[in-house]
Amino acid sequence: MPHIDIKYFPRELSEEQKQALANDVCEVLKKHLQSKDSALSVALTEVAPEDWKSEVYDPVIKPALDNLVKKPGYTM
């Protein structure tokens, strides 16, 4: 495995652009974690800017701050 869950502000991405993003992320994981393509899954979830704190920062980022390898350059 892993499963990658990318949360981001809404963007006008075509299905081809979403697939290219997923493919690029998978290539990095295959390189660094020696994952097989068949073991990888990717979710792309749009989150409105006004919902970021309640849907992403507070429940996902803030509790994991001590474990994040790359911390955000902002606080909320």
Image (tube, rainbow, N blue to C red):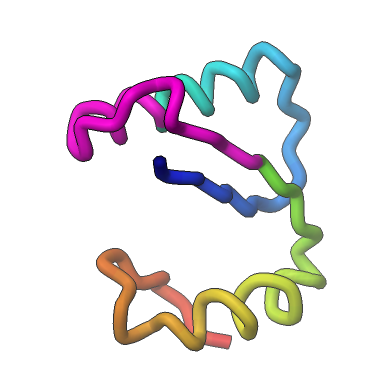
Towards the viewer: 42 or 75: 42
Image side of residue 23 versus residue 50, left or right: left
Q: Position of residue 10 (x, y in %)?
A: 76, 45
Quarter occupied by residue 29: top left
Q: Residue at x 46, y 32 (%)?
A: 40
Which part of the image, by quadrant, shows the C terminus?
bottom right
Quarter occupied by residue 55: bottom right
Q: Residue at x 69, y 79 (%)?
A: 53
Principal secondary structure, stretch drawn in magenta: helix
Range covered by the magenta-colored residues? 26-43
Q: Position of residue 44 (x, y in %)?
A: 66, 41
Where 36 falls versus 70 (above or below)? above
Towards the viewer: 1 or 74: 1
Where 56 falls versus 32 (above or below)? below
Image side of residue 24 versus residue 30, left or right: right
Image side of residue 68 versus residue 60, left or right: left
Q: Position of residue 24 (x, y in %)?
A: 41, 23
